[in-house]
Image (cartoon, grey):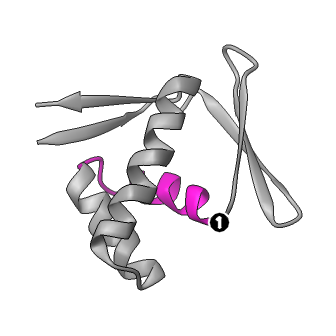
Amino acid sequence: MTTIENKKNYSIKKLKKNYVILNEETGRYLFTNESGKKIIDLLDRDSRLNRLVESFSRHFEIDIMVANSHVIEFISNGEKLGIFKIKNV
């Protein structure tokens, strides 16, 4: 099972229709949209990757494979930023 550790070492600011996520420890940042913000919100409820993808797919009414691609891409970018850690347990 793959889980995502949300390090919660960041802040999020809305800028018009997008969001900026600032890693408060490193000063590095990432721009994202509503879907990235939704992934962060969903992580607060469940850290299991498969559940995250299912919830994302239902929320945006998109195919599960498309949702999986979007979630993996965002989580990978977040891991590079240092705000998430992917764990295989």
Which residue occupies 38% across, 68% down? 66
Q: Residue at x 48, y 57 (%)?
A: 39
Kindly identify the amino acid type of the residue bearing the numbered disc 1.
Answer: Glu
In this view of the protein, which residue sits in the foreground, 68 or 39?
68
Residue numbers of the magenta segment: 34-48
Mark 1 highlights which residue? 34
Q: Position of residue 29 (x, y in %)?
A: 73, 31
Residue 31 image-quadrant placement = top right
Image: 30 above or below 25: below
For label 1, count other residues whose C-alpha is less than 10 Å away and answer few (under 14), some (14-19) or many (20+). Answer: few
Is residue 45 a member of the stretch shown in magenta?
yes
By secondary structure, the bulk of the magenta-drawn segment is best described as helix
58 over 10 or under it: above or below? below
- What residue appears at the point 47 percent right and 29 percent down from the top-left corner? 79
- Element marked by disc 1: helix
**Residue 44 in view:** no
